[in-house]
Image (cartoon, grey):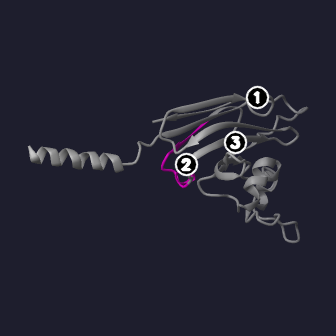
Amino acid sequence: MKRGTTWLLTTAGVLATAPALAADLSIKVTLPEIARNGPRAANRPYVAIWLRKEDNSFASDLAVWYQIESPRRRGPAPPGGMGPPPGFGSMAAGGARWLNEVRQWWADSGHRLQFPVDGLTSASRAAGTHELTFAASDPKLATLPPGKYKLMVEAAREHGGDEVVSLPITLPLTAAQSGKTTGRTELGAVEFVVTP
């Protein structure tokens, strides 16, 4: 009898100190089909997905989609030609120079980054619904203190507009939660689901 009691107390102590079960964060971003710009097809938008704290200060970058390589010029700038703006590394031939058009994200975080960024930046996306999944253990989320945040999604397009939407989200990702909103011009439906 004494042994059983000791074992139960030990198990209870382990359960009390174990972390809460983690969850996955799934984000879906829909980019609407944009009408042609005269004879030219509409350009793909640049998109940034990031987190702000409840007080609107920057918390963490999740994803940035942009034109990785310029279709007009491949390779480094020609001798005597203009180089990339400061902070753009070797991306003279790519579209990183236009990332400042994603204005709110740029003010929050983009202006401090060197492009490309492993695990963060990738190519721009065509119209349609695109899904990203992050584990609670992902460093982009795991290092943030518990609290209320805003999931921010911003899209900007050359010869187009700029649009930002936000959804409230609570960290850490330990319980089911979801949110959905819809943009009016550059963004369609934006939603997230946290699945324990």
Image quadrant in which you'd find residue 93 = bottom right
Crowd rating for badge 3 (residues with CA inside 10 Å; few <14, some 14–19, many 20+): many
Crowd rating for badge 2 (residues with CA inside 10 Å; few <14, some 14–19, many 20+): few
| Residue under numbered circle 3 | 152
Q: Which quadrant: the N terminus?
A: top left
**Residue 97 visible, this orientation:** yes
Q: Amino acid at mark 3?
A: Met
| Residue under numbered circle 1 | 33
| Residue under numbered circle 2 | 146
Q: Secondary structure at mark 3?
A: strand
Q: Amino acid at mark 2?
A: Pro
Above or below for 43 versus 86? above
What residue is shown at x 79% (from left), y 48% (from top)?
104
Find the magenta span and give its range. Answer: 131-143
Q: Amino acid at mark 1?
A: Glu
What residue is shown at x 83% (from left), y 64% (from top)?
85
Residue 94 locus on image (x, y percent): 76, 55
